[in-house]
């Protein structure tokens, strides 16, 4: 199971990087969403993949009877999902706002903060 | 529900004795900021009460962090575990001298920023939540400096990042939206990289506790790809700190928000990246950082040169200062690349200096623009004639940022140059001095054009009066820079002790695992 998930994570990361390299914000947003999921899958895989074995220690035992999946990475993913979702929401609103205020979603054309053709500082007076 | 087993031995899993009263100081800065941030959010329509509450709360925060620093300096690193679980299982907050010193300095910077914001942030900015965002930013910054758990560090990074988004777009001008898009995407990629690496780290170590990792790392060097981990962490934190090939978000965004926000960002955010880099590179993976040290040295040199050459090319003072922030980051990276305890001491000292002086410089640039009609060096002038004290303070700050005596920038630069020569990388020492020289030229030109030059005819008509409240934050920061420069002994000793603890983390480990050694 792990090799399949590892390959899947690799594909997700590749797609995310490809989309993030785009000039257009809407594609970058898709890249961010996929990147978040790639990371979640990655952490999920790092905590062993098991089917239907609850991590519960039976009565009279000190350790679980069989191998179980590690629940901690799943808790980490839960945190990461919440955070990446809130980030994605913020970036989505910011991009919409940027599109309506700046009139473009092409990052090459976004030169308001760093305008072209600024005079260098005077060399003397 | 009756459980029919023998009574469990709780002492194997839980901390049973109550937390010592003084140890609560470990968590208080974070809890206090979150609580006050929530209160400020509730009263965000009361634009008169907001700054009063925030300034008082931040003054308390300075007190808390000062007490924490004193406690740590007296008793060594202090640990507190959430939920009373024993360390590698519970999330640990562990404070050593480095963390406490950074936390105190950041609290001072935030307090001064909050005072300066009384003038700079209008009622609308307050209604949109400047002060709540500031308190939550401080919660994130303090948490990052105080935590002893890698995933927890990631969470605090996100807390401070999301608050910084709020501060960055406050006012919603076109420039700000543009800058925020670049800041947002690039910082998101950096924190995601941090998270990816943390996932790998957990896969390798099975623990997220920093002390546990530091204890286990030497045993795993042969079998696990620790250099890969260190390289990924270095890239992630270098991106947060705006080091050379990944620095472009900083000059694109730092000049766009209100000047107080720029000042706070310049003082706080990039230094969190440097702090994380010190923590990971010096305490957790020293042997792996050693292998990367040549790459780090190249990156540091290029960062310093990009910063100071970029500053020379700017005619907007805020953008110029953004490049000086980058140049300072390069100097700190140089110390991390050298890696000896003396160099790390220099980095810690430099970070404290940089937090104070960069904040002051941005505030001074804002005040200069208000008095002389703009940030552009082509139109400003005439400050010397009417505002002698302000001019003198600015000149001191320019000297401090260039690393000239007797100001705070001098000593860390001496330490770094000496460590570079002792460490056999004299060329890095040369770049350090060259970047200081270029910084001097850039800031000297600001002084010449904005202060010394007579005001252009059309703006010279009415010299504006200068309120003491506007000057006070700059005055306090400049005086502290001069005092650090004249009496560096205390800070020097603290920085060196902090570096020694990082280099030989047995005190840190003992604080987390009192029985001695990880389980």
Image (cartoon, rainbow, N blue to C red):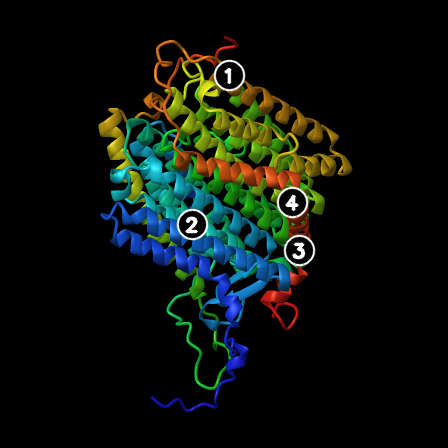
CB atoms at circles 1 and 3 under 8 Å apart? no
Up-down relation of residue B217 to residue B344 (above or below): below
Q: Is residue B219 left or right of residue A113?
A: right
Up-down relation of residue B220 to residue A23 (above or below): below
Disc nearest the viewer among 3 and 4: 3
* C-alpha gap between disc 2 and disc 1: 37 Å
Q: Quadrant of residue B514?
A: bottom right
The answer, for residue B151, to whether it is visible in the render is no
Disc nearest the viewer among 2 and 1: 1
The residue labelled by disc 1 is B452
Disc 3 element: helix
Residue at figure coordinates x 37%, y 26% from the top left: B465
Place of residue B435 in the rendered image (x, y in percent of width and height, measured from the top left): 62, 26
The residue labelled by disc 2 is B138
Disc 4 element: helix
Disc nearest the viewer among 3 and 2: 2
The residue labelled by disc 4 is B289
Q: Is residue A44 left or right of residue B442?
A: left
């Amino acid at each position: 199971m792990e090799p399949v998930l590892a390959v899947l994570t690799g594909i997700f990361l590749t797609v995310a990087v490809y989309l993030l390299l785009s000039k257009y914000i809407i594609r970058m947003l898709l890249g961010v969403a996929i990147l978040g999921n790639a990371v979640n899958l990655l952490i999920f895989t790092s905590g062993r993949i098991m089917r239907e074995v609850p991590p519960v220690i039976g009565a009279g035992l000190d350790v679980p009877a069989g191998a179980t999946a590690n629940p901690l990475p799943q808790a980490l993913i839960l945190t990461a999902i919440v955070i990446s979702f809130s980030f994605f929401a913020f970036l989505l609103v910011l991009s919409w706002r940027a599109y309506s205020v700046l009139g473009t979603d092409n990052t090459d054309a976004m030169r308001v903060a760093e305008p072209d053709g600024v005079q260098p500082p005077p060399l003397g007076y | 529900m009756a459980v029919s087993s023998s009574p469990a031995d709780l002492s194997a899993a839980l901390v049973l004795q109550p937390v010592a009263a003084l140890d609560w100081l470990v968590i208080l800065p974070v809890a206090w900021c979150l609580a006050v941030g929530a209160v400020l959010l509730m009263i965000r329509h009361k634009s008169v009460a907001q700054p009063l509450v925030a300034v008082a709360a931040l003054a308390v925060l300075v007190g808390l962090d000062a007490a924490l620093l004193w406690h740590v300096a007296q008793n060594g690193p202090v640990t507190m575990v959430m939920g009373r679980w024993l360390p590698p299982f519970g999330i640990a907050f562990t404070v050593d001298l480095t963390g406490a010193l950074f936390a105190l300095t950041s609290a001072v910077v935030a307090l001064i920023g909050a005072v300066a914001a009384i003038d700079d942030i209008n009622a609308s900015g307050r209604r949109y939540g400047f002060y709540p965002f500031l308190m939550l930013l401080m919660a994130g910054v303090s948490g990052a400096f105080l935590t002893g758990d890698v995933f927890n560090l990631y969470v605090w990074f996100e807390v401070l990042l999301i608050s910084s988004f709020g501060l960055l777009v406050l006012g919603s001008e076109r420039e700000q939206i543009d800058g925020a898009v670049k800041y947002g995407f690039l910082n998101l990629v950096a924190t995601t990289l941090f998270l990816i690496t943390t996932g790998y780290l957990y896969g390798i170590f099975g623990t997220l506790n920093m002390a546990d990792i530091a204890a286990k790392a030497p045993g795993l060097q042969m079998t696990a790809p620790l250099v890969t981990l260190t390289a990924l962490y270095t890239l992630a934190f270098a991106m947060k700190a705006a080091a050379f090939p990944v620095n472009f978000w900083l000059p694109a965004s730092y000049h766009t928000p209100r000047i107080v926000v720029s000042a706070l960002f310049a003082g706080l955010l990039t230094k969190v990246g440097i702090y994380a880099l010190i923590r990971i590179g010096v305490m957790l993976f020293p042997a792996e950082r050693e292998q990367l040290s040549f790459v780090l040295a190249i990156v540091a040199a290029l960062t310093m040169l990009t910063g100071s050459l970029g500053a020379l090319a700017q005619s907007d003072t805020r953008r110029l200062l953004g490049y000086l922030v980058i140049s300072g980051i390069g100097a700190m990276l140089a110390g991390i690349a050298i890696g000896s305890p003396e160099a790390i001491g220099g980095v810690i000292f430099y970070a404290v200096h940089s937090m104070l002086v960069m904040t002051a410089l941005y505030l001074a640039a804002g005040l200069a623009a208000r008095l002389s009609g703009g940030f552009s060096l082509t139109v400003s002038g005439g400050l010397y004639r009417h505002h002698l004290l302000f001019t003198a303070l600015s000149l001191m700050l320019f000297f401090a940022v260039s690393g000239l005596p007797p100001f705070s920038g001098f000593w860390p630069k001496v330490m770094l140059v000496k460590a570079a020569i002792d460490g056999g990388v004299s060329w890095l020492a040369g770049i350090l001095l060259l970047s200081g020289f270029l910084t001097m030229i850039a800031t000297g030109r600001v002084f010449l054009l904005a202060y010394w030059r007579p005001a252009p005819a059309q703006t010279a008509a009415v010299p504006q009066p200068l309120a003491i409240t506007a000057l006070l934050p700059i005055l306090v920061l400049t005086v502290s820079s001069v005092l650090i420069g004249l009496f560096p002994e205390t800070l020097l000793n603290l920085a060196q002790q902090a570096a020694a603890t990082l280099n030989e983390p047995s005190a840190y480990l003992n604080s987390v695992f009192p029985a001695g050694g990880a389980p």
